[in-house]
Amino acid sequence: MAKVIYALHTTLKFLHNITFRIFWGIIISISAWNILSIFVLTIKRYFSDSISIGIETTYLQWNNTFPAVSFCLTKNRSSGRVSEFVAAENIPHAVSRGIYVKNLHDYMFTNPNNFHFKEEYCDGLNSTCGVDILRLRRELLPPTCQFFMANVSYLGKVVENCEDIFKFHQLEMGYCYLANNLLDYQSFENLPLKFGISHRENNLKVHLRGGFIWKYEMYIHSPDDLPYFNSITYDAFSDPTIYRFNVEEYDNNPDVQEEAIQQRSCKFPNEKDPGSPWHYSFSTCMSYLRIKFELDQCNCTHFTSPEKYKPYYCDTKGLRCISDAQITSQVKEYVVSKNACYPSCVEQQITLVGINQIQSLDITDTLYIEISITNLPSVRYNRVVTQTYLDLVVSVGGVIGLFAGASALNFLEIVYVLLRRKL
């Protein structure tokens, strides 16, 4: 009888131990699973969703930034000055003078979107169609806005010297005159064209002279961008014209720039691509890729590229190579397929509201253009960091403490016990 009782007691004790171990095994497994699952979710959130974009509406206090306004010169019908230059230089040409002058006029205004000149009209001449194309452009095109801007006013106040606003630059779209662009200023805070609720007229008015070998293409864009081959352009009509826009801006908390580019999915102007001659923006990224594609496929780049590439400027054959290769189309496809250019973190969102031609405004000797902000911005986007590295550590520590009852102090105690045993 005693043996039976002993056997029964032993069996019950064994079953109790097994049940106890299974119970705690299940508890530990559930805790480990929860720790692992929450840890993975926390890591994913940290690397993919650590930046949040909120909306700020305290617009009464804002000092808003006017969009950048750029005027670039493009080919006009009149070619009188080109004809005078050819006659003065006594340039020999196989084709008729009229055809040669027209072709040289086209050659002057080539850009990544425009290759209308004909290489065969330059037969028997040097590789740049009988001229130094850079010298030709210097002599026939204006290096300052004062040559063609008759009158400029901002917020209803006359600007005595247009160069106080419009700065000259040679860009890929040609001779360009840029207002309120980051290319000329250190930061958005230093940009000169600002407006707010205290101003009655939120506009920039420009009078342009006509009758030259060039006409004007206008670009309205974010101050960090430059006119480039994929920009939207606006014409300078013969009738006085008002272009109306709405603008929304991005504001970034200081700690946003400390986050990885992949996490915030944008780049700041000081994070330019290695080797790029410009600050970073989506447009400069596209332009830099265009230059690299041209150099790689044609061993030269368009003569409107920055001066650092002057030893690699294309002659007429090189320009034909760029045209035949459709470099700009290649760049667009590459950027889309490879996500090669991040948007700018400070890029303005600019929306065209409407275009009005003013018949009643009697202006005969100049082209009148007005760029107007229709509505005072009432929304500003604010990019903030919602999960920093410290937040990640705290989250992971909290999960381990919740499901395992462990802390950093416990781990130190374990290390201490192990070291003490060894001693």
Image (cartoon, grey):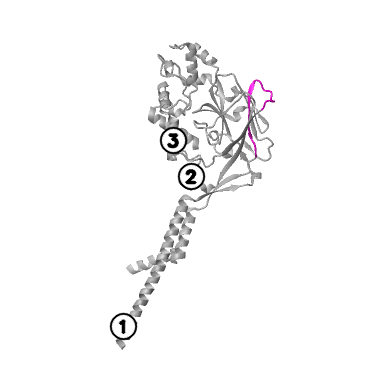
Provide the residue designation for mark 3: 333
- In the rendered image, is residue 423 in sight? no
Mark 1: amino acid: Ala
Give the amino acid at mark 3: Glu
Instruction: Identify the residue position indicated by label 2 in the image.
Output: 265
**For the point 62% across and 40% down, which residue is it?**
64
Amino acid type at mark 2: Ser
Query: Does dot 3 land on a helix, a strand or a loop?
Result: helix
Residue 1 appears left or right of 271: left
Name the image quarter holding the C terminus: bottom left
Crowd class of label 2 (few under 14; some 14 to 19; many from 20; radius 10 Å): some
Residue 332 falls in image quadrant: top left
Q: Is residue 133 above or below residue 285?
A: above
Element carrying mark 1:
helix
Q: State the extent of the magenta-drawn residues as a range.
A: 358-375
**Residue 251 location in percent, x, y?**
57, 44
Task: Name the element at disc 2.
Answer: loop
- x and y, in percent, of residue 234 in the image: 57, 29
The residue positioned farthest toward the bottom in the image shown: 1
Q: Label 1 neighbourhood size at 10 Å, few (<14), some (14-19), many (20+)? A: few
Inter-mark Cα distance, 2 to 3: 20 Å
